Image (cartoon, grey):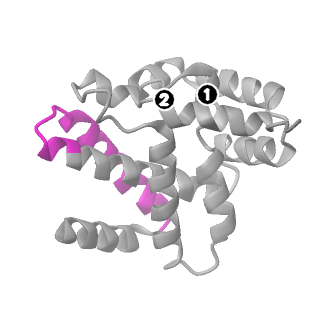
Amino acid sequence: MIVIPNSVLYAKILLNLVRTGWLLRGVPTPLAETVAEHSFLSAFICIEIGSRIQGIDIGKVALYTLVHDIGEAFTGDITKPIGLKLGELKNRIEEDYVLRYIDNEIIKELYKRYVNQEDFEAKFTRLCNYIATLLIGIDYKKLGYKVDEIVRNTNNEIEELSKELNVKDIVKNLLTELMTEA
């Protein structure tokens, strides 16, 4: 009998978990980005930008990106405004579920480090998550969905965090490249 590790089962949940913010702005479920799609795009963005930054551990960044939303397999995708109102409670609840129910120690440790933003790579991963959200938001905006607030707020987060991490020029250049090609 084949036993599937529970982390794989929880990751499968993210394949079908639609990001709530898009739904609330009218993006239909079949078109709305899932949490797993978001993580996938974020990973490629992290690799692309990270390859332009000296000294960054790309492997760690890619792993952070894969596990950063595993807590949502337990709680669902909580929108940013609600998450901000809940504050650290949201993070603690998700982290508690991950630490209690995920069997893989590497995944638990990576998740904990990401949530606590323990190193440059964790913060950089968060930046790439914002960039992925911005790019999808721009696509939805072009399709006529009312996602202006998400696009605007996410762009502000990108500017602040890229400045804090001292990668503002690299991020700006990449976004310019992507917008030109799109």
Residue 87: % across, % down: 55, 23
Left or right: residue 101 compared with residue 174: right
Report which quarter residue 24 is drawn in. Answer: top left
Could you tell whether 129 is left or right of 175 in the image? Answer: right
Q: Position of residue 16 (x, y in %)?
A: 49, 31
Q: Is residue 120 visible?
A: no
Residue at 82%, 25% in the rendered image: 100
Eyeballing the image, is 182 above or below 132? below
Does residue 116 belong to the magenta stretch?
A: no
Label 1 and label 2: CA atoms lie apart by 8 Å
Does the magenta portion include 142?
yes
Looking at the rendered structure, the kind of residue marked 2 is Leu
Q: Is residue 172 above or below residue 129?
A: below
Quadrant where the image shows the N terminus: top right
User: What's the amino acid at mark 1?
Assistant: Ala
Where are the magenta residues, as a range?
140-166
Location of mark 1 (residue) = 73
Image side of residue 115 versus residue 141, left or right: right
Is 9 located above or below residue 140 in the figure? above
The answer to which of 6 and 3 lies nearer the viewer is 3
**Going from the N terminus, do you reach mark 1 or mark 2 first?**
2
Taking depth in this image into account, of 59 and 116 the one nearest to the observer is 59
**Rendering coords of residue 104 (x, y %):** 84, 42
Q: Quadrant of residue 163?
A: bottom left
Query: Neighbour class for label 2 at 10 Å: few (<14), some, many (≥20)?
Result: many
Of all residues, the one furthest to the front in this rendering is 1
Quadrant of the rendered structure where residue 181 is? bottom left
At label 1, counting other C-alpha atoms closer than 10 Å, the crowd grade (few under 14, some 14-19, many 20 or more) is many
User: Where does label 2 land, which residue?
Assistant: 17
Residue at 24% x, 70% y is 176
The image quadrant where one finds the C terminus is bottom left
